[in-house]
Amino acid sequence: MSPRTAWQAMARRPLRFLTSSWPWRAVTYLATGVLVGSVALAVFAAGLTVGLALLPVLVGLVVLVGVVLFAVAVARLERRRLLLVDRDGLPDPHRPAGGGGFRAWATTRLTEQVTWRELLFTLVSAAALCWLDLLVLAFSFGVPALTFEALWVDRTTWPWAAFGVVVLLASPYTVTSWAGARGALVRTLLAPRDGELGESLTQVRASRARLLDSFDAERRRIERDLHDGAQQRLVSLGMTLGLMRLDVAPGSPLAGRLTEAEGQLADAQRELRRLVRGLSPPVLADHGLVAAVEDHASRFPVPVTVDLQLPGRLPAKTETHLYYVINEAMTNIARHSGARSARVYGRYHSDLLVLEISDDGRGGADPEAGSGLTGLADRVTALDGRMRVSSPPSGPTLLHVEVPCHFG
Ligand SMILES: Nc1ncnc2c1ncn2[C@@H]1O[C@H](COP(=O)(O)OP(=O)(O)O)[C@@H](O)[C@H]1O
Ligand SMILES: [Mg+2]
């Protein structure tokens, strides 16, 4: 799958990244950032001065309101521009203005919380971000240009020109790093908060989460029933067989059949234990996600490297969801990939848990072809996370999951 963000693109092999459109998109993003930022700065400076000076005669208030509405427009432009470095973009969190006309529109905007976040963002953008854009562009392209010009005039400055060459060669990475960081900041500040996208969306998400919760509760019930019911019956059946053996002459044909029955019973018990463990492993509840995944991996038909580093225990619901995500991804590896090895990787950083489950198999995983991968996406969505699959036709397959969470 092709990368969705500038940062993901940068993580690919250098040649693929350098020949893609991403470095150019990043340059465009920063260049237009300088442009938007300087216009915003001019409008703010003029608007605030005039607005504050004329405040006593009320015209100033109108000017100040104008400045706020201008920030809404800038934020809207920023959401568009974000598409340059993040293909997913951001939805517009504003309520549609009731009625027609500018007044209705302006009143709606001024009563929304998101407007004030946008004002803050535009201020930050004008005061700092656009300068940083300029600085990165100047360093990446201006510095090399200056050193080459110096070399033209004076041959002895060649060490500087060499430095210029290095800076220029690194520039796609320099520019894309900052463009990606800026995109992430825009996403953080301008993303709609809960409820801002209207009732229906949050409701859908909530009911989906509810469905999964009841699914997990049902799983636990079945597990308990199996444990207390079927398993106990098998245990007492074993005891009955043991008592029968006391009455049977050793070496008789009946004794042979009894041994056979005991063997079958042991198989059934093993099978049932495996089933129960598969439903919800006791290690998950007792020792947490890392232990449960390591336990599962140790009994897995394909060799799995587990490299999970988490600072502690997660909330139970998150642990259950993530366990099943990893579990289903691993089941897919065993069933479909033909891989020789697999890896489960996880790190926690700045409130974001990143999981990667990968294999070196034949690839071609297709969410449309079954219900497993979409089920995974449901679980990840229920945790407000994101999931991506990369699985080109000849492999390898990578499942990338990001979930915001806090450790208790
Ligand atoms: N790790 C993988 N390697 C190769 N193919 C995969 C992998 N995971 C999934 N697939 C393919 O994607 C399809 C969809 O997977 P999934 O949604 O889990 O459905 P299911 O496992 O029920 O078939 C599978 O049928 C399989 O062909
Ligand atoms: Mg599957």
Image: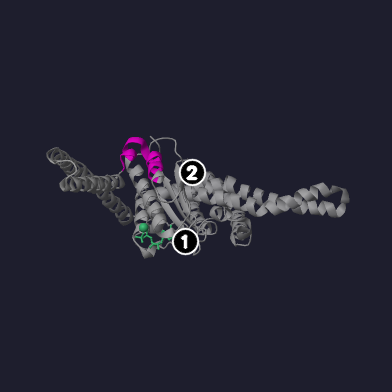
| Label drawn at residue 363 | 1
Q: Is mark 1 within 8 Å of ligand 1?
A: yes
Mark 1: which amino acid?
Answer: Gly
Q: Position of residue 59 (x, y in %)?
A: 48, 50
In terms of sequence position, does the residue under pointer 2 or pointer 1 come before the other? 2
Q: Is residue 178 visible?
A: yes
Mark 2, Cα crowd under 10 Å, few <14 / some 14-19 / many 20+, is few
- Left or right of 266 on screen, residue 149: right
Question: Is 136 part of what is drawn in magenta?
Answer: no
Q: Secondary structure under badge 1?
A: loop
Q: Could you tell me the amino acid type at mark 2?
A: Pro
Main secondary structure along the magenta-highlighted residues: helix
Assign a secondary structure to mark 2. helix
Range covered by the magenta-colored residues: 281-296
| Quarter residue 28 falls in | bottom right
Q: Which residue is mark 2?
A: 56
